């Protein structure tokens, strides 16, 4: 289970997050129900196909009650699970952690990543940026000779309560004038891709021009208001 507050990966059965103490039970229950539903949805067609083949071969009477019974059990278990699982956002999302396209769930069915708190996910050449309600994750990527695609590394998590002066500005170089996302990170460790500039720890990442508007509208939502303010000295 990935913690929705700090992004840390905990083991599937942990009750609380090792880092921040967040109760993980709700998310795990949700994930279990989603997996049960997935198993039923995948096995039901196979069972029905076997019954169909069997009835055409051995005659209808022998198998009809068995078929009805299985249909009833499957139908009722799906209905039962439906009442147990809360309904969340309607649009389906793409999991930044494992790239699984999930089924309108709050948590990724495959890896347990929290999807509800993602405000935006932006792909650039060298890194992907996940803007989350509680943190900003930066996934660095590099080109590999063996893989056709870019290889994505595990993200570096920047907690929102340590981010200051978050803004979109321009990162001018001799050859390009791309917009970039900048912030100061208030932590003893200045972890990459952040870099020390004097006594400040600065994160500076190029973004694509087409994402500039959406990132700016996320910054205007009010969720990041503390992170937008300049550093208090
Ligand atoms: Zn946590
Ligand atoms: Zn996932």
Image (cartoon, helix red, strand yellow):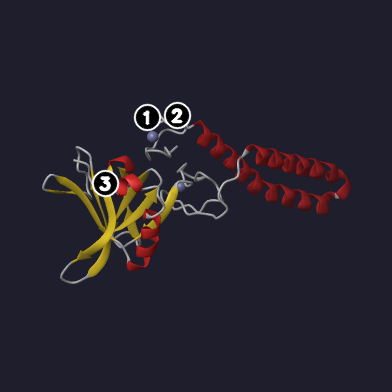
> Which residue in the protein does label 2 denote?
14
Whether label 2 touches label 1, CB < 8 Å: yes
Whether label 2 touches label 3, CB < 8 Å: no
Examine the rendered structure and indicate whether residue 112 appears above or below residue 218: above
Whether label 3 touches label 1, CB < 8 Å: no
* Mark 2 residue element: loop
Q: Is residue 160 left or right of residue 31?
A: left
> Which residue in the protein does label 1 denote?
18
Say few, some or many: other residues with alpha carbon within 10 Å of mark 3 (under 14 / 14 to 19 / 20 or more).
many
Of labels 2 and 3, earlier in sequence is 2
Say few, some or many: other residues with alpha carbon within 10 Å of mark 2 (under 14 / 14 to 19 / 20 or more).
few
Q: Which residue is drawn at 15% across and 70% down?
A: 174
Q: In this view, does 61 lie to the left or right of 137?
A: right
Q: Is residue 55 left or right of residue 26?
A: right
Of labels 3 and 1, earlier in sequence is 1
Find residue 27 and report its horizontal and vertical position in percent.
51, 37
* Label 1 C-beta lies within 8 Å of the nearest ligand 1 atom: yes
Q: Which residue is drawn at 40% across and 55% down?
A: 218
Q: Distance between the residues labelled 3 and 1?
A: 25 Å
- Tag shown at residue 164: 3
Q: Is residue 190 visible?
A: yes
């Amino acid at each position: 289970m990935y913690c929705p507050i700090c992004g840390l990966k905990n083991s599937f059965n942990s009750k609380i997050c090792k880092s921040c103490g967040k109760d993980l039970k709700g998310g795990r229950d949700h994930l279990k129900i989603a997996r049960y539903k997935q198993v039923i949805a995948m096995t039901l067609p196979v069972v029905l196909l076997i019954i169909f083949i069997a009835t055409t071969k051995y005659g209808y009477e022998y198998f009809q009650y068995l078929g009805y019974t299985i249909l009833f059990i499957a139908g009722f278990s799906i209905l039962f699970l439906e009442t147990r699982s809360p309904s969340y956002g309607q649009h389906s999302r793409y999991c930044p952690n494992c790239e699984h396209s999930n089924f309108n769930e709050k948590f990724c069915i495959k890896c347990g990543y929290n999807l509800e708190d993602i405000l935006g996910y932006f792909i650039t050449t060298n890194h992907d940026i996940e803007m989350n309600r509680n943190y900003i994750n930066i996934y660095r990527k590099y080109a590999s000779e063996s893989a056709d695609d870019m290889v994505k590394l595990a993200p570096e998590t920047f907690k929102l309560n340590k981010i200051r002066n978050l803004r979109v500005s321009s990162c001018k170089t001799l050859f390009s004038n791309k917009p970039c996302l900048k912030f100061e990170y208030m932590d003893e460790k200045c972890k990459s891709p952040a870099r020390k500039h004097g006594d400040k720890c600065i994160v500076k990442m190029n973004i694509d021009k087409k994402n500039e508007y959406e990132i700016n509208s996320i910054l205007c939502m009010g969720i990041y208001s503390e992170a937008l303010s300049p550093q208090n000295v």
